[in-house]
Image: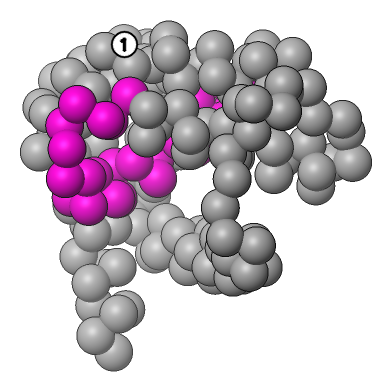
């Protein structure tokens, strides 16, 4: 699945970035939303039934995340009405509660990782650094970074599964 995800990232990262940039009009915020979008997509990729709609699905996630971020920061949303993603009116509060619970759980799961894995995951997923940049920052080989990133993801997946069954 990781190679499939990497292919999707390479194919759609610009589309997702520009969807976020269109709403936020801030490249730094758009980059943050890009990372959050692909983190969510990685967890939910198995739910996508039609591969041809992945780009639209990712763009919708990015747009919604951008709108939520701007609302949270009390900024104005810059999006034409016809491009607003609509959902059921009652789902907003439920989505917010679910997002907060997932965020809290993710922070707890990441904190449970061994330090070597935690730092690589933080630099890659949260700060958006490439494997090469992480390798240089930590004085490691890119292959070591790739291995640690994989092990961190697998450890998070295992921790997540154990927390849901407990």
Question: Does 64 sit above or below residue 83?
Answer: below
Q: Which residue is denoted by mark 1 in the rendering?
A: 132
Question: Does 133 sit above or below residue 68?
Answer: above
Q: Main secondary structure of the magenta part?
A: helix
Kindly identify the residue that appears in the image at 58 percent across and 31 percent down.
Answer: 63
Kindly identify the residue that appears in the image at 72 percent across and 28 percent down.
Answer: 81
Is any part of residue 53 visible from this angle?
yes
What segment is highlighted magenta in the picture?
A: 28-55
The percent coordinates of residue 72 (x first, y second) are: 80, 47
Does 76 sit left or right of 128 as displayed?
A: right
Asked if residue 53 lies in the magenta stretch, the reply is: yes
The image quadrant that residue 149 belongs to is top left
Kindly identify the residue that appears in the image at 26 percent across and 30 percent down.
Answer: 53
Is any part of residue 28 visible from this angle?
no
Does 126 sit left or right of 149 as displayed?
A: right
The percent coordinates of residue 146 (x first, y second) are: 19, 27
Q: Residues within 10 Å of mark 1 (few under 14, many from 20)?
A: some
């Amino acid at each position: 699945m990781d190679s499939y995800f990497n292919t999707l990232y390479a194919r759609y990262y610009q589309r997702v970035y520009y969807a976020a940039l269109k709403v936020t009009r801030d490249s730094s915020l758009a980059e943050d939303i890009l990372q959050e979008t692909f983190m969510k997509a990685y967890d939910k990729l198995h739910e996508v039934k039609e591969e041809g709609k992945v780009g639209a699905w990712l763009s919708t996630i990015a747009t919604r995340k951008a709108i939520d971020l701007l609302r949270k920061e009390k900024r104005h949303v810059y999006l034409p009405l016809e491009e607003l993603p609509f959902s059921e009116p009652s789902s907003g509060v439920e989505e917010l509660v679910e997002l907060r619970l997932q965020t809290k759980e993710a922070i707890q799961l990441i904190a449970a990782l061994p330090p070597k894995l935690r730092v690589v995951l933080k630099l890659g997923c949260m700060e958006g650094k490439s494997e090469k940049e992480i390798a240089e920052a930590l004085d490691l080989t890119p292959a070591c970074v790739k291995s640690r990133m994989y092990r961190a993801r697998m450890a998070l997946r295992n921790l997540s599964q154990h927390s849901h069954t407990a």
